[in-house]
Image: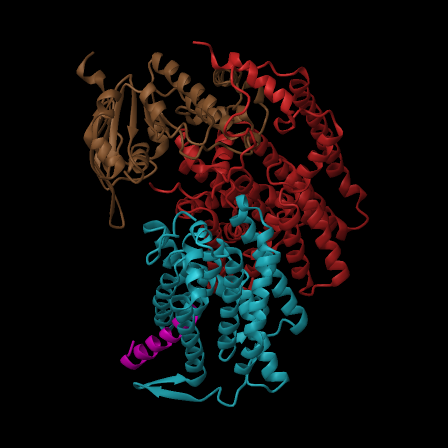
Chain colours: A brown, B red, C cyan
């Protein structure tokens, strides 16, 4: 593996301050290409703020985010999406009054000006969307409005929508939040499958079982910056991590 | 590793058949409505008993145009502009001033005024679209109010409160003929707008706009350039409204800032679109017909007192409280209830649920029930809590 | 501009700003407790002014006395409005629907005023209408001073209420974080209703103050809601002190511009300030946390 291929998503010195609180404090993280990276840490450690800075929802006050050699710091979310990073939301977000199929069809890669008035539901796009719905397992709900789905189904729908954009890196914000164990298992196997096909993952998570069983590389956050990183086993036995979680 | 989808039972025949069936019925109904509508428009002028009724018809059609043009923004993106009359007035005055000062033929001036409106809307839109929800409404109202001030104050250019007279494009026509010609002109403009609305509705642009309406941040995260999309929709909406205003100027011939830059007119647009159904192609038209006719009736019965304000306020309030989705969706829902029922996820029995879980290899009770979750969504969703 | 003219404009600006501040505070209250943009606020303002005028010209009562009736009346109407109307709206589309609903209410009130009292312009004539005081060399009309006094006292009372009473604490908690407020046992629904009533009460106070010195007509409220809404956006949506500061700044600005530009063009300052705010700092200049992408 060459040097450049190994450095997929790199963050240097990322800082975000909210009225005196340093939510993210000079964070330096390099995420491993082609692996499942996990980002864990106690509440208030700045994981979600970090996540939102990387994905463009918030403009960081300092630092850089580089993706495949291109700097994407502070670019708007749709530019980051086009660069190849897909993301899910902590509180699962779907388009409530659109059908499940439309929810997936929305995701686009760069649309040229002349494509604007092209029909949204071309055979090719619809077939691809249907394939994704089959993959996550909600194809039978194709015509249902998203707001009529259960929370777990919405999570799967959100994932299908993200996949539609063909991202090579997917960032998940607490994918196991608020869902029953069987669904967690299904999401976990989907992530493993996609990763085996080459997608890099970055997962912010609290569910330790999921993190330990899924990830190749774990980064532990505390007070706005990483304090430990390594394989799940190494991180689990690191005294600094225990300290952070137990607040000693 | 087993594919996630293989663990689910196949859907029943009934649930896949009816959505397609009802889609066919809906298309049939829409086609029928279109034919009936086109006939009504074509025959109305000959059936109108006198010139006054014919002119009322022109007014209703002009309302239909402005309501539809408003809906390009309100319906697609969910951004509610209460000051859209600003563009109506700009188009009207633009046409009048171009005819007066540049001496161009009426309809060339009209088209040119449309271009001017489009150009003006770009910086306005850029500023206004930096905010959402309530702030956007405030900005839209402010815009029409400031234009009212400017057009009243700049008497030398706009005629101020004395108004502006716009010469008729066909000076030799008698009044009934004049109304008849403009009836068809407005109908043609409306047809063009409806066609454009339909084209956008089924396009990638349209689905992107609707995603913005449902959840703007999520749409952006999925790769939609929300700022550009919103701006384009806004400029299109404003330009079409301006064209409607210009047409009105050519028909009516007499402009006054109070009536053209009128919050009331703006509220009519919203009321009509809302009443008919803002997510529907023909919603604004339906709303315009109902409200337009009602307004004419009010004028006849109640005279020109302030009571029409009371009536408008009351009607708008009632629609907001009791029929926020409008008439067309209510009718559609009614028709759906009459037709073949598709199984809703909520109607799955516990037995079927247990069967499904068994097939998926899951034990009976899950920690979280499969109850439908309600989700706030919409352009005014606040950003997530910072951790 | 000569020194004394400048001074006079400044003082008048402060007086005007005070009135704006009171009204903007009320407008912020509705937004704070229920995220509602109450477009009908200025319509009620004008209604209060009409009631004061009516009492003064038909009943011979000093307009300030009408406060005894209008303040509690408007307070009650505010509470009722929140209970019966605003609460019925679906939370998903609350902002848009509340704007439309309050817009409808504004139309309704304007129509009612016009129907009951006709469209002609009205003005209160008081025995002290034309007297003026000399302050630092500038001649200021007594009625303007009284109006300012009323506004200032009301703002002070509002401040005391918000900062030093239990209800005020509950109100501030509800504004800042409704869920957290509920968790500590505050009945946010009731508080919201009372907050609404409070907002409308400021309209009563403001309207009465306005009636002393202004010519009123049914559609006057549109000349007030525009500037008021601009003020709360410039100040920062949801922040009462922000609104008050913006009100004072813009009031003084308007007054200073009135001499060279005339009344009509001086009013544009609000819209220009709004435009600048949108381009430079959309969340407002003096605002609190609530001013986020509303």
* Residue B255 makes an appearance in the image: no
- Residue at horizontal 73 percent and vertical 52 percent from the top: B294
- Residue B192 drawn above or below residue C270: above
On-image quarter of the C terminus of chain B: top left
Q: Residue C76 sits in which quadrant?
A: bottom right
Q: Nearer the viewer, residue C71 or B233?
A: C71
Q: Is residue C12 magenta?
A: yes
Lateral position of residue A95 relative to residue A34, left or right? right
- Residue B47 drawn above or below residue B312: above
- Residue A30 drawn above or below residue B152: above
Kindly give the residue lying farthest to the top in the view shown: B1
| Residue range (magenta) | C1-20
- Residue B166 drawn above or below residue C63: above
Q: Is residue C155 magenta?
A: no
* Residue B330 makes an appearance in the image: yes
On-image quarter of the N terminus of chain B: top left
Which secondary structure dominates the residues rendered in magenta? helix
Which x, y percent locates residue A13?
A: 19, 35
Which x, y percent locates residue B164?
A: 56, 59
Lateral position of residue A140 relative to residue A73, left or right? right
Lateral position of residue B20 relative to residue C172, left or right? right
Which x, y percent locates residue C195?
A: 50, 62
Which x, y percent locates residue B272?
A: 64, 47
Q: How many marks on residues?
A: 0
Q: Nearer the viewer, residue A62 or B293?
A: A62
Lateral position of residue A40 relative to residue C229, left or right? left
């Amino acid at each position: 593996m060459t040097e450049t291929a190994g450095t997929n998503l790199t963050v240097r010195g990322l800082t975000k301050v909210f009225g005196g609180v340093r939510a993210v404090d000079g964070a330096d993280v390099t995420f491993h290409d082609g692996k499942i990276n996990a980002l864990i840490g106690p509440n208030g450690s700045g994981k979600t703020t970090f996540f939102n800075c990387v994905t463009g929802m918030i403009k960081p006050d300092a630092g850089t985010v580089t993706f495949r050699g291109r700097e994407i710091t502070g670019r708007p979310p749709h530019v980051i999406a086009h660069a190849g990073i897909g993301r899910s939301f902590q509180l699962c977000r779907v388009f409530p009054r659109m059908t499940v199929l439309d929810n997936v069809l929305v995701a686009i890669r760069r649309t040229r000006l002349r494509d604007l008035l092209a029909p949204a539901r071309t055979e090719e796009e619809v077939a691809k969307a249907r394939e994704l719905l089959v993959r996550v397992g909600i194809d039978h709900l194709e015509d249902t409005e998203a707001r009529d789905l259960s929370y777990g189904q919405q999570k799967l729908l959100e994932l299908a929508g993200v996949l539609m954009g063909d991202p090579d890196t997917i960032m998940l914000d607490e994918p196991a939040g608020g869902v029953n164990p069987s669904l967690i298992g299904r999401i976990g196997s989907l992530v493993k499958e996609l990763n085996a096909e080459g997608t890099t993952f970055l997962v912010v998570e609290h569910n330790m079982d999921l993190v330990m069983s899924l990830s190749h590389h774990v980064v532990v956050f505390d007070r706005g910056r990483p304090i430990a990183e390594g394989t799940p086993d190494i991180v689990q036995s690191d005294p600094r991590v225990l300290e952070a979680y137990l607040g000693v | 590793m087993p594919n996630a989808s293989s663990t689910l039972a196949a859907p029943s025949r009934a649930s896949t058949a009816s959505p397609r069936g009802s889609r066919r019925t809906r298309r049939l109904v829409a086609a029928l409505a279109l034919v009936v509508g086109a006939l009504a428009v074509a025959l109305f002028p000959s059936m109108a008993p006198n010139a006054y009724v014919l002119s009322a018809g022109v007014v209703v059609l002009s309302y239909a145009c402005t309501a539809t043009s408003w809906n390009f923004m309100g319906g697609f993106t969910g951004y509610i502009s209460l000051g859209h009359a600003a563009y109506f007035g700009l188009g009207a005055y633009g046409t009048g001033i171009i005819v007066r000062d540049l001496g161009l033929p009426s309809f060339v001036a009209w088209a040119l005024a449309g271009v001017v409106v489009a150009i003006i809307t770009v910086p306005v839109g850029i500023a206004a679209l930096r905010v959402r929800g309530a702030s956007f409404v405030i900005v839209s109202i402010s815009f029409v109010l400031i234009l009212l001030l400017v057009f009243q104050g700049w008497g030398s250019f706009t005629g101020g409160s004395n108004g502006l007279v716009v010469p008729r494009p066909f000076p030799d026509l008698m009044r009934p003929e004049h109304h008849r010609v403009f009836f068809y002109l407005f109908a043609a403009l409306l047809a063009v707008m409806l066609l454009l609305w339909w084209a956008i509705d089924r396009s990638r642009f349209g689905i992107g706009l609707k995603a913005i309406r449902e959840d703007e941040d999520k749409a952006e995260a999925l790769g939609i350039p929300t700022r550009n999309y919103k701006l384009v929709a806004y400029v299109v909406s404003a330009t079409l409204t301006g064209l409607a205003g210009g047409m009105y100027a050519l028909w009516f011939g007499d402009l006054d800032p109070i009536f053209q830059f009128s919050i009331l007119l703006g509220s009519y647009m919203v009321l009509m679109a809302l009443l008919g159904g803002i997510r529907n192609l023909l919603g604004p038209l339906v709303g315009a017909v109902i409200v337009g006719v009602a307004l004419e009736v009010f004028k006849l019965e109640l005279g020109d007192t302030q009571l029409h304000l009371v009536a408008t306020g009351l009607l708008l309030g009632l629609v907001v409280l009791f029929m926020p989705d409008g008439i067309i969706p209510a009718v559609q829902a009614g028709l759906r209830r009459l037709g073949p029922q598709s199984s809703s996820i909520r109607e799955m029995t516990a037995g079927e649920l247990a069967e499904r879980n068994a097939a998926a290899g899951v034990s009976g009770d899950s920690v979280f029930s499969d109850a439908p979750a309600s989700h706030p969504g919409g352009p005014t969703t606040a950003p997530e809590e910072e951790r | 501009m000569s020194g004394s003219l400048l001074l006079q404009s400044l003082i008048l600006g402060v007086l005007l700003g005070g009135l704006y501040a009171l009204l903007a505070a009320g407008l912020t209250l509705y937004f704070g407790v229920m995220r509602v943009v109450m477009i009908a606020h200025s319509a009620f303002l004008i209604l209060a002014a009409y009631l004061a005028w009516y009492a003064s010209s038909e009943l011979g009562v000093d307009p300030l006395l009408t406060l005894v009736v209008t303040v509690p009346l408007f307070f009650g109407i505010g509470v009722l409005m929140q209970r019966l109307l605003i609460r019925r709206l679906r939370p998903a589309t609350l902002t848009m629907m509340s704007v439309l609903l309050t817009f409808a209410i504004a139309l309704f009130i304007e129509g009612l005023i016009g129907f009951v009292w006709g469209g002609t312009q009205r003005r209160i004539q008081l025995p002290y209408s034309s007297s003026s005081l000399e302050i630092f060399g500038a001649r200021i009309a007594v009625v303007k001073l009284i109006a300012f006094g009323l506004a200032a006292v009301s703002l002070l009372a509002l401040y005391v209420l918000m900062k030093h009473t239990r209800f005020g604490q509950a109100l501030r908690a509800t504004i800042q974080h409704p869920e957290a407020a509920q968790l500590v046992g505050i009945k946010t629904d009731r508080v919201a209703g009372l907050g609404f009533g409070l907002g409308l009460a400021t309209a009563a106070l403001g309207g009465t103050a306005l009636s002393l010195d202004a010519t009123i007509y049914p559609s006057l409220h549109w000349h007030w809601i525009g500037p008021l809404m601009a003020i709360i956006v410039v100040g920062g949506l949801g922040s009462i002190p922000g609104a008050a500061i913006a009100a004072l700044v813009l009031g003084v600005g308007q007054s200073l511009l009135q001499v060279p530009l005339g009344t009509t063009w001086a009013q544009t300052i609000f819209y220009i300030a709004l435009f600048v705010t949108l381009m430079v700092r959309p969340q407002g200049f003096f605002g609190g946390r609530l001013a986020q992408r509303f």
